[in-house]
Image (cartoon, rainbow, N blue to C red):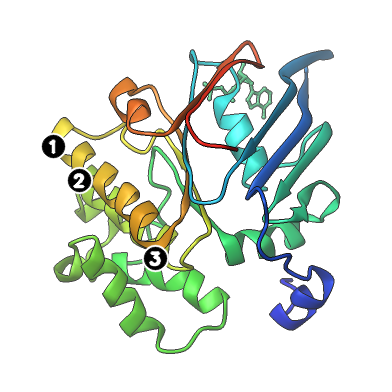
Amino acid sequence: MLVTSRAFLYLYPKKHPVDNILNITNLSKTYQSAGRTLTVLNDINFSVAPGSTNAIVGPSGSGKTTLLGLCAGLDRSTSGSVELNGINMSNLTEDQRAQVRNQYVGFIFQNFQLLPTLTALENVMVPLELRGEKNIKARALDLLDKVGLSERGHHYPLQLSGGEQQRVSLARAFSNAPKILFADEPTGNLDAETSDKVIKLIFDLNKEAGTTLIVVTHDLELAAKTQRIIRIKGGKLISDDKTVNA
Ligand code: ADP
């Protein structure tokens, strides 16, 4: 069960302003597989400035998705810590991490991850409802309008193209006006023209609302649009080219 937002605020008073929206310290992740220990992330350290745009790049299997999941509180590290908006995520339960995500985080997946039995509009309404907000239908329609899909609200995900599904998932991710948006290969399944639309929406959110962006991508053109490129190889951070003071 989700803790109530009042209990949540009591448990985790907001520190404002935070110097870094994200602090990753000595982060490691191992999996046990067939009796062997697989080290997927090995002692990763970096911090992210609020409002900055960041790309994480690296070969397949290097640990990028795992890293993004840990940063967003979708999973827990084996050791080290993740501090998101001043909250140490490492000691929280799954429900508490979900609560933090609901409040501060947007997440976009390469394969969209829309709920197939709900319409586009209903998919966008879910997080609004979870947060107990009012006028959720009107707000969800506004969000769909923002991504250019107000006419498609009654369609189910399978009735939409890949690009349209990704725009619905953007509307859903934008619904809590996130302080930080994590995107895992957001253009990986899209054609060039649709990719451009999706990238524009993501960067507009950064410009208009100051949302911090962290994008895992193979697309070097997309990475080059960000202020910073973090390279991961074999679970280690091998370079960090900053143009912002993080
Ligand atoms: P990338 O996003 O860079 O392609 P991933 O983070 O998806 O890399 O995966 C890194 C490594 O971790 C891969 O070898 C993958 O097989 C392994 N891995 C990911 N999730 C699990 C899991 N739940 N159990 C075991 N191994 C996993």
Marked residue nearer the N-terminal end (3 or 2): 3
Mark-to-mark CA distance, 1 and 2: 7 Å
Q: Are marks 1 and 2 in contact (CB under 8 Å)?
A: yes
Q: Nearer the viewer, mark 1 or mark 3?
A: 1
10 Å crowding of disc 1: few (<14), some (14-19), many (20+):
few
- Compare residues 104 and 70 and report the one nearer the observer: 104
Where does the image place residue 66, in percent across and percent down from the top left? 62, 30
Location of mark 3 (residue): 123
Q: Which label sits on residue 149?
A: none
Q: Which residue is mark 1?
A: 193
- Amino acid type, callout 3: Asn
Say which amino acid is labelled 2.
Lys
State the CA–CA distance, disc 3 to disc 2. 20 Å
Residue tagged 2:
197
Residue 111 position in % (x across, y down)? 39, 40
Q: Secondary structure at mark 3?
A: helix
Instruction: Find the distance from the CA under tag 1 to the CA under tag 3.
Output: 24 Å
**Residue 34 visible, this orientation:** no
Q: Residue at x 28, y 53 (%)?
A: 167
**Identity of the residue drawn at 51% across and 36% down:** 244
